[in-house]
Amino acid sequence: MQTFENYTYERPDLEQSKEKFAVLLDAFKNATSADEQNEAIEQINAFRAHFSTLFNLVYIRASIDTNDEYYQKERDYMDEIAPEVQKLDTDFYKELIKTPFRSELEKKWGTQLFEIADYSIKAFAPEVIGLLQKENKLTSEYSRLVASAQVEFNGETYTLAQLGPFMQDKDRDVRKKAASAASGFFEANAEKFDAIYDQLVKLRHEIATTLGYKNFVELGYIRMMRIDYNADMVANYRKQVQESIVPLVSKLYKKQAERIGIDSLKFYDESIEYKTGNATPKGSPEWIIENGKKMYEELSPETNEFFHYMLDRNLMDLEAKKGKESGGYCTFIEDYQSPFIFSNFNGTSDDIDVLTHEAGHAFQVYQSRGIGIPEYIWPTHEAAEIHSMSMEFLTWPWMELFFQEDTDKYKYSHLASGLRFLPYGVAVDEFQHLVYENPEWSPEERKAAWKQLEEKYLPHRDYGDMPYWGTGAIWQRQGHIYESPFYYIDYTLAQICAFQFWKRSREDREAAWNDYLNLCKLGGSKSFLGLVEAANLQSPFEDGTVESTVQAIEEWLESVDDKSL
């Protein structure tokens, strides 16, 4: 059995690859039957899967160690050739949508493949290859800048991820100093963060106008494959969050201030939930994994098989360390049929959320990996986040393994933080709409826009005497804004769906799990709203869904004597 360390990477020769692909595409074009075209598609998909494998191996290994010169150079190379590979995909899609055998292929693969092909064509032209290469370089530059943080704190040096536990310290002075230290890194590099984003915004605007769009907003939605909803529906959804959830979240923060015994909740207090300290896992990373194994063994036969697969092949890199990029992600290495989980364990409850959240992604892709075409391995982003966020709730019966006497604390915090996240999530989304509708804005104007959005969606927020965050710059911590434009509202849409799974799992656990498992197996074979319907969930866009879903959460939180936790 091969483990991740033995998965083979070899730099692809772009010109040879183009020649090989041209032969494969000719076979598709010249096919005289649907069966012949399906054979050609299988060959093309094997070629694309291999390229995807190489990209992912480079991306994973470069993010695990930003000081690894070999993989940093390979990442630069992949950034350079990615748009050229995207052109090959687009060439295939152009032939796919005009095939005389389309109706037969749709019967075999479904219509979603053709929708994806159509959107991919709209998002690309050879004229923007050079601009896409620059975009890739700038997003990698942002990742490296964040990963380079060496923050001095209490006589030690920490990465931003390693500062996390200090932000949740029971001692208010420690929390404030840790938050100030993190803020200080961004302030010291303010010009770099501003310059990278300024270039990205203008570059994306140029890509959009070159492709014939008014601005990047329309192109951003196309890139995100938002096939069955639009910006107006999203705006209406944000309005529901503002009306139904912002007042409730303000109330939750007021309760939190009372619980921790302070008059005025500052930004650096938001992460501490209880006077006695937050719920934390009661053991080492190795202990967490052992308990994770027990949890997934008991949850279902499918999760048992999946988690052992991940462990046996070393498909998780979980601990925070110097030189490692921040954040967490799950990706899929196609040639090896292997999900991979990347994270930064730091001793907080986030470690368990990662074990459930990223494992939710990995479990989904493990279930859908045999579906037959690359387009269906993953669903679109907002649908993919349903799997991860719902897994966080479906594993609630096993939280005592990790938190022991703090289990009730964890559950209360987990639900409350899910609610508190929603206004921030929609603020990030509206910010990006404003930024890309006004690409000529200066960095100062962007920060002013963020401050206004905080007043609208985060009226409780008070930075105290932390001047840099108070200037409207805190969004610079959010990597999605730099790296994956418009990928953020997705988390909030999925949260509304995951809350529904939480509610249903309490009413009929078996039915909820079966719907969840079915959703995972569908992969990306349907659009977002198609998958929501298949999972027997209510659409977050429907008027009233947000309010009715949140009502059950509010009732549960109200039933808990939070001051006793």
Image: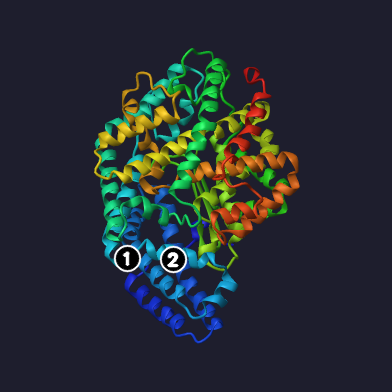
**Residue 11 to residue 62: above or below:** below
Q: Who comes first in sequence, dot 1 or dot 2?
A: 2
Q: Callout 2: 10 Å neighbours few (<14), some, many (20+)?
A: some
As rendered, which of 267 and 108 lies closer to the eye? 108
As rendered, which of 74 and 38 lies closer to the eye? 38
Residue at 48% x, 42% y: name it: 236
Residue 291 visible in image: no
Q: Position of residue 318 (x, y in %)?
A: 51, 43
Q: For numbered disc 2, what is the local secondary structure?
A: helix
Residue 132 visible in image: yes
Residue at 32% x, 65% y: name it: 125
Q: Position of residue 227 (x, y in %)?
A: 48, 57
Q: Which mark is residue 125?
A: 1
As rendered, which of 499 and 343 lies closer to the eye? 499
Q: For numbered disc 1, what is the local secondary structure?
A: loop
Kind of residue sitting beneath label 1: Ala
